[in-house]
Amino acid sequence: MAKYFDFSHIRGDLTGGLVAGVIALPLALAFGVQSGLGAAAGLYGAIFVGIFAALFGGTETQASGPTGPMTVVSAALVTAVLEQTGSIESGLGIILLAFTLGGIVQIVFGLLNIAGYVKYFPYPVVSGFMSGVGLIIIILQIAPFVGLDSPKSTVKVIQDLPRIFSSINIQALGAGLLTVAVYFLFPLLTKKIPAALAALVVATVTVIVLGWDVPLIGEIPAGLPGLELSTIIGSLGQADWAMVLEYAVVLAVLGSIDSLLTSVIADNMTKTRHNSNRELIGQGIGNTLAGLFGGIPGAGSTKGTVVNINAGGKTRLSGTIHGLFLLAVLLGLGSLASRIPLAVLAGLLIPVGIKIIDFKGLKHLTKVPKSDAAVLVIVLLITTFGSLIQAVGVGLALASLLFMIKSGKSGEERLSSSDLEALEDEKPWQDELPFFEANKDRVLVKHISGPLFFGFTAYFKQQMELVKDPVRVVIIRMDRVPFIDQSGLYTLEDSILELELRNIQVFLVGLKEQPCDMLTSVDLIPDLVSPEHIFDHIAEAYVAARVVLVQPID
């Protein structure tokens, strides 16, 4: 064990883990209730994800457990299964199957180095999704905050507002308001005790002492959770596999993004460097076990991780202690937790929802490009009032489409005339100057920087159409083209054919491995472009160009 755990920071790890666990307790209970599976499911998830993500993850100080975004997706899954089966009990196996598969998919992500691609998610999509998740959390807490049962979707909550406002439980509303007040005001007195815990205790004790009649969490099973493997296996035949796999992938992707963003924050605070792929494997193991034991999935918790580090946590032992503390609470204090009012948990979740909303991104909506603002707003609205899965898909599709349009237009805007001089980006590079000055009227060097893909093909083809007499040779420099897709491949083929029909010779320079493989696979090499017309360096192409220039025109 000494080889795996570093005990040299045991005091700081113990303090950090305990403080992170104290903060995680009320939120785990609240997230469990919001998921629709009950407070116990939130606690189970916090225990398994907390312990095993710390043991096997790649961020030394990460504190993991149920988070707002993961809980919102879990709740959407519970609602979808409930509509199909009619009850949580009959659909529990399907729900846990999706949770478990989500963890397995996350492990696969880690093994396949998917972590390296997470950074390519467009900011407007992530911002719109996270803000939508924050609004969902807030809207779904409106009814519990006033002591009523909550509809299962934001649209139904909005539609149900007249009933909610006419049936307010004043005592529950008082408990919720007291919770929010303590949550925000308590840090002004002291920061030694977590505000969430203080709000939970103060509001719950007040309700008990005053004898208020408000809805409670209810009984939390005592002892260790049981393995739900038989329940999951029993659901295999009745599961809607398309839905199960869809939610599993969404949970895996969202959990990965959530965890890796927190890992970056931990790196900045500790001046260390996390292992992204190992982090995904650890989170996946935690979520797989959480699903097998009836818990909701989780991810790296930014708040818990920051508190852990500030309290002295240095190694993975701190995150493990955080999970073990929650296990101890489950074994010893479950009966006390059952007396917590639902309005108090709603009062804890509303500030969490507020913090998830990306106010920075929303504040800058009028200052960023209109396309980015449109993507953010569309994703936010679909997330809040529609499907979380569709929101991400639509957002990525729109962001990709707009990127392609902008990539094409950035070049087209430079084509203001039909003259060859309109090719302003064809100014010679340093290694082309001597030859360029002597032959600029008869030899055009076309530079391509970046991938030759379908978003750039229209611009490229339009440029090639501008080439005319007296140009005899076009040298296409592909030194900076790492990738060419099918659209780019066929556009290059069409352009070369058209140029050669006009007796213009085409040379390729600096062809990299992937583009070369693509051209060879469809026989453009050697059928259209002879290997003798492909060069590693521009100087070699110039030698061949001089030969063409001295030949008579057919």
Image (tube, rainbow, N blue to C red):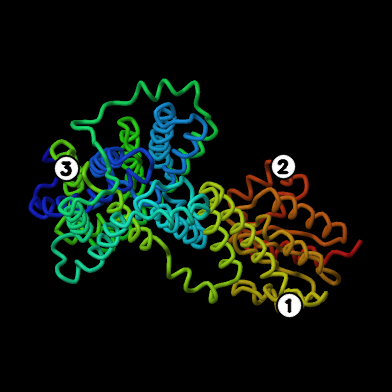
Q: Nearer the viewer, residue 519 or 278?
A: 278
The numbered mark, 2 or 1, whose residue comes first in the sequence reads 1
- Residue located beneath label 2 in the image: 522
Query: Spatial distance from mark 3 to mark 1, Cα to Cα?
Result: 89 Å
Tell me the amino acid under the disc marked 1. Answer: Ala
Measure the C-alpha gap from mark 2 to mark 1. 36 Å
Kindly report which numbered mark, 3 or 2, lies closer to the viewer in this rendering. 3
Q: Determine the residue positioned at 40% across, 36% down.
A: 99
Distance (Cα) linking label 3 and label 2: 70 Å
* Quadrant of the rendered image containing residue 544: bottom right
- Name the amino acid, label 3: Leu
Q: Secondary structure at mark 2?
A: loop
Image position, residue 531 (x, y; %):
70, 49
Question: Which of the two marks, 3 or 1, is nearer to us in this view?
Answer: 3
Towards the viewer: 473 or 5: 5
In this rendering, position of residue 237 left or right of residue 318: right
- Residue on which disc 1 sits: 438
Secondary structure, mark 3, is helix
Residue 431 image-quadrant placement: bottom right
SS for callout 1: helix
Crowd tier of the residue under label 1, counting other residues whose Cα lies within 10 Å: few below 14, some 14–19, many 20 or above: few
Q: Are marks 3 and 1 in contact (CB under 8 Å)?
A: no
Residue 371 percent across, percent down from the top left = 61, 67
Question: Which one is earlier in the sequence, the residue at label 3 or at label 1?
Answer: 3
Residue type at the position of mark 2: Val
The answer to whether the residues at label 2 and label 1 have Cβ atoms under 8 Å apart is: no
Q: How many marks?
A: 3
Q: Earlier in the sequence, mark 3 or mark 2?
A: 3
Judge left or right: residue 84 versus residue 189. right
Res. 336 mark: 3
